[in-house]
Amino acid sequence: MRRVSTRTISSGLAAVACALLVLLGAAGAHAQGRRSRPPPRDEPKAGADQDDAEDRSPLRTEPVIAPPSDPLAVSPETRQRIGSDWDGRPPSPEGGLRHTQWLPYYEEQRGDYRLRLMPPVFVEQTRGLRDPTQALYGVPATPDTQGLYGLLYYRRRSLQLDMDVVFPAFWRVRDKESHTVVAGPFVHREAPGENDNWLAPLLFEGARKDGGYFHSPLLLTTSHWGHDGAFTLVGPYFRDRTGRDVDAGVVPFYFHGDTGSLDGNRRSYTLIPPLVFYHSEHELEGSSLTVVGPVVSKSDPKRDVLDVAPLFFHIHGKPESGGVAEDHTTLFPFFHYGHDPEQKLFILPGYYRRVTATADTMLTPFVSSAQTRSGATSLTAVGPVVPLWWNYRDRDLGVHAWALAPLFYSSDSPAGRDWLTPLVGRFESYGQSRTWWVFPSLTLSADTHGWENDLHPIVYVGRSDDSTHTVIAPIFWDFANPKSRTTVGFPLYWRFADGEDDSVTQVAANTLYTQKRVAGGHDWQFHLLPLFSYGESPTGYFWNVLFGLAGYTRDGAMAKVRALWIPIDVSGSRAASQTAIAR
């Protein structure tokens, strides 16, 4: 069964639709002609009103709509939505099959299709033969012929594609307006605004409407260029352009870049590694940087910097262009001087002087002084290297402290008074705390929460609110508060008490005593390890010798005897005893 293509069906439907539209148009025109004829009327009588005759208008006719030129035309949007099963190739040939055969020649033809064979001389296929009967089936407007001749030569002729191939040495291809010729290692291609010439693998060259390329591996050269940028590499030389931005150099000896911007934001740099040289400029910031070995020079609208690392450093301000009036010079490690609107700084070996609007500080190995808050505070120190005498005063806070090291220290303020000698000292905050220190390590302290006396590092005794502690290291510790207490007499005595459940655990030598609060009273036990144990509870008691070699336990109505560590029930049960207690 022959395959009927979508185009064939569409063409048939188009013909039927056109015929129907023609018939409808003819019928409409005939009806219109009949309606346009006015009915017979009597002639107006003489003297009749001519105005009434003039107001009468002829009858209206129905409009005629012309049929569309292509009833099956579909917009691109609708075509994309509904899709199509057309694969772009011509439909299957239509018509009867005719064939001719004279061995070894064979030929067959159906409609616009023809196949000719004479293996192995040639094989040829053609579509689009001139055949009037095929006009309705969408055959190609021009013949499309392709064939293989002599097993090595392939030939094709069509409207969009021409090919001549002598495998594998020669190729000639025309694809629409593009022409390509390949002859061994040589390739030539031409298209509108384009061309390529290759001699593989030695040379590759091509041109485009806005650029081109050139590659030669043997010459270590590659280059491509266009409207937006270009890149060239010839051995160690390179050049890269993106718009107006250009970078070039000879690796690793020289590098240079320039943005070439015309909007006031131009940037450029130059780097010469063998000479330890670098220079850059930024037009928008108005800055530049130059490095030549240890010399660094930097400039911007606010300041100039000149350094010779690591010995000389200099900064100069530019108040006329937005900077501040400043100068800083350092000759390391011998000298530094700098000033700006806020301070002056002068440094020499063994001398430091800093002056601001509210402070003046001088430091030397022999005499040092400092004043802050416009003289509200002052400090004076005298001594070789380490100050032997110093005096500090804060007039706003009423603080005065002075010392004659290492003999005496004194400090007075509205909040308290302190003094210290090598043997004894006293530190007091009025109404808050007082501490005495006695050589070598005795401190006696008291404050609003309690007191504490310590003999470091052996004795610590004190109270803070409801908590107390006593420590005599390393043999005795006692810590107590309203909720618990811990006492340790190392290593023979340990006692832990918890006030919330009235529990006690105590170890003294080889004795153990435990206690806890239970319903109806207390449950307590005493053990003389490992000989004897005794305990009582609100419901009974027990005793054991050697952990149960012999023993007796009573819990309400239940009684149990232990002999050779074997428990023996002698009366009642624990459940019965609990029932009796409940009653």
Image (cartoon, rainbow, N blue to C red):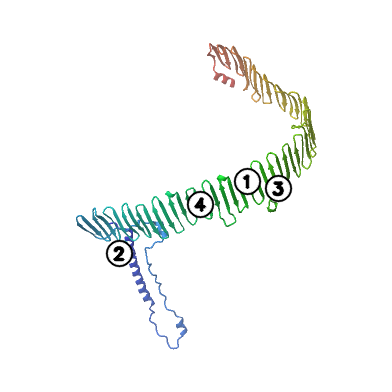
Q: Earlier in the sequence, mark 4 or mark 3?
A: 4
Which residue is identified by label 4?
240
Residue located at (60% from left, 56% from top): 264
Judge whether residue 417 can be spotted in this image: no
* Front tag of 3 and 2: 3
- Looking at the image, tell me whether mark 4 or mark 2 is earlier in sequence order: 2
* 29 to 315, vertically: above or below: below
- Decide if residue 398 is on the left or right side of residue 29: right
Q: Is residue 269 above or below residue 468?
A: below
Calculate the distance from the C-alpha at mark 3 to the C-alpha at mark 2: 95 Å
**Residue at numbered disc 2:** 135
- What is the three-letter code of the residue carrying label 4? Asp
The Cα atoms of the two marked residues, 4 and 2, are separated by 59 Å
14 lies left or right of 359: left
Tell which circle, 3 or 1, labels the residue nearer the N-terminal end: 1
Image spot of residue 502 (x, y percent): 65, 23
Say which residue label 1 marks. Answer: 296
> Toward which corner of the image does residue 455 lie, by quadrant?
top right
Residue hosting label 3:
326
Alpha carbon distance from label 1 to label 2: 86 Å
Q: Quarter holding the N terminus?
A: bottom left
Nearer to me, 432 or 13: 432
